[in-house]
Amino acid sequence: MLLITDNYSLSAGGAENYFFELKKRLEAEPTLAIFSLGFGEKPSHSPTTLILKKIQSNIKRLLWQIVFHPLVYFRIRQFIKAVQPDVIHLHNVKQYTFTLFLALRHYRVIQTIHDYGAVCPTAHNIHRDLRPCATGWRRACFWQHQVKFNRIIYLAQTCVHVLTQYLQKKFVQLCFAPSPELVTYLTHHQFSQPHYIPPFKKNLGLPQFNLIEPNHFFFAGQLGAHKGIFQLVKEFAQAYQSRPFLKLTIAGEGASKGKLKKLIHALKMQKNIHLIGWQPCLNDYYQRACAVIFPSVWMEAFGLIMMDSMLQGRPVIGSNRGSPTWLIEEGVTGLIFDPSEVGSLAKKIIWLADHPETIKPFGLAGYAKIQKLIDNETTIQQIITHYQNIAAH
């Protein structure tokens, strides 16, 4: 089996963490030989792994997604011929996309679709009014999806999207998606055999509640506008006006960190909102939090932070788009808010702060839900069975 990702880095994000967790679990299977290929900061080559230099510039990366690169093609093709995989399992493909797919010709290919980029050029799958698109990108709502880029970049991104979708449908025999909702979108867009395959959950033991600080909220994730961080800070500042004892810890890095700092200072919230950067382990922060806020304005395919929060026994306050509406049961495992409605998140923060007695029952219900939804051994066996079925045809 050959696993391929476009960002060979553990600290990159949820899709990359899933890639390495899958790799580790497959390598533990005695009947499988696992190889990997990706793009990273430092090129390297071993008998089992090929890492090519990734493109850092967004403009160059966009260009090379649609233009053939003979040297990259040769390196990939040479490695594939050397390892002779029965099945190739793709993940994200935003580096040398056209070249990569051409190198995979004549091989059996499965792909895990990690986000809504498969059905929307911006991967957000929301309209300008910040409401989710019910169908995925199409001609009727073409300009409504332009929420991230200027017109020129958006048109270029759309060209890349159309080509990538064509290549996926032509060369990929089977698709995995981490949520039933994304499977529905992929089916609507005629992807090949979309299947729901959940991510792997961590084995953390039973939730603990003795360290909770009742008015301490927590966010973890990429510091990008699509993650709703600006709305989070503004809404938290609004809640603070009537509940000045509230505290918020924000863990993560990203392109918007500088702007976020300026906003916190402008709102005079430095004493109550703390940026702690990227953290290799979040357990201590979960333990102290009364709830985790998941404020994404884009469509989340799954949201590993939500799962981790629920495994820690912490309620989640999540936005009403993508997987939060599937994982979070309003008033049972957490609370749902509308990011397009000013004050919606602030009301939920205030409500939970005013009802600390709900933290433990919400947390226990969330923990039970994840235990019911996801079984790691079942998941890995489902994946291996799909490998075997594809290899046999």
Image (cartoon, rainbow, N blue to C red):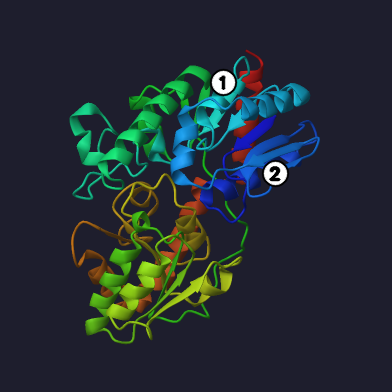
Q: Mark 1 against mark 2, which lies toward the viewer?
A: 2
Residue located beneath label 1 in the image: 102
Can the viewer see residue 330 in this picture?
yes
Say left or right for 188 vs 365.
left
Residue 15 circle label: none
Left or right relative to 128: residue 371: right
Q: Nearer the viewer, residue 225 or 250?
A: 225
Identified at 31% across, 46% down, the residue is: 149
On-image quarter of the N terminus: top right
Q: Does 353 sit above or below residue 342?
A: below
Q: Nearer the viewer, residue 365 or 24?
A: 24
Circle 1 crowding by C-alpha within 10 Å: few under 14, some 14–19, many from 20: some
Residue 378 location (% of width, % of height): 61, 39
Residue at 62% over, 53% down? 10
Instruction: For mark 1, give the secondary structure.
Output: helix
Q: Nearer the viewer, residue 197 or 301?
A: 301
Q: Are marks 1 and 2 in contact (CB under 8 Å)?
A: no
Residue at left offset 61%, top offset 43%: 19
Figure quadrant of residue 335 = bottom left
* Image coordinates for residue 104, horizontal then vertical, percent: 60, 22
Residue 117 at what x, y percent from top left?
A: 40, 38
Q: Which residue is mark 2?
A: 43
